[in-house]
Amino acid sequence: MYADKTLVCKECGKEFVFTAGEQEFYAEKGFENEPQRCPECRAARKASRMGPREMHTAVCAACGGEAKVPFSPREDRPVYCSECFAKMKEE
């Protein structure tokens, strides 16, 4: 039903592919317009609107190493470093 389309980014002028899967997603969400920016420009635009993330330092509950997280850690909840969190997700 859908086929990949090559579009041109209005921001940087680079060609990018609007995949069949993305088109289906847009249709499911009721979006009527095709994307005007490539994924890189969309990500950069989103990041510029949000501003820099404040990172907090905590001690990993599993290995005791340093963990940097984008939220303020609470005493009653464990915090894990990236490696330990990834291991826990695998299990």
Image (cartoon, rainbow, N blue to C red):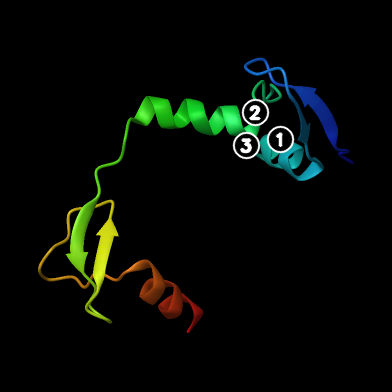
Q: Amino acid at mark 1?
A: Ala
Q: Are marks 3 and 1 in contact (CB under 8 Å)?
A: yes
**Residue positioned 63% across, 34% down in the render:** 39
Q: Which residue is mark 2?
A: 31
Q: Is residue 72 above or below residue 12?
A: below
Q: Farthest residue in the front direction? A: 65
Q: Position of residue 44 (x, y in %)?
A: 50, 29
The N terminus - image quarter: top right
Looking at the picture, how far across and down is residue 29, in whole percent?
62, 37
Residues marked 2 and 1 touching at CB (< 8 Å):
yes
Check disc 3 and report the residue beneath it: 29
Residue found farthest to the bottom: 91
- Mark 2 residue element: loop
Point out which mark residue 77 bears. Answer: none
Against 87, residue 58 (above or below) is above
The reply, left or right, for residue 45 in relation to residue 56 is: right
Q: Mark 2 Cα within 10 Å, few/some/many (few <14, many 20+)?
A: few
Pointer 3 local density, CA inside 10 Å: few below 14, some 14–19, many at least 20? few
Q: Residue at x 18, y 64 (%)?
A: 58
Up-down: is 49 above or below 20?
above
- Which amino acid is tagged 3? Lys
What is the C-alpha distance between the residues marked 3 and 1? 5 Å
Q: Are marks 2 and 3 in contact (CB under 8 Å)?
A: yes
The kind of residue on which mark 2 rests is Phe
In this picture, residue 28 sits left or right of residue 18: left
Where, by quadrant of the figure, is residue 41 drawn?
top right
Please, is residue 80 above or below residue 7 in the view? Answer: below
Mark 2 → mark 1, Cα distance in angstroms: 6 Å
Between residues 74 and 15, which one lies in front from this camera angle? 15
Location of mark 1 (residue): 27
Query: Residue 27's quadrant in the figure?
Result: top right
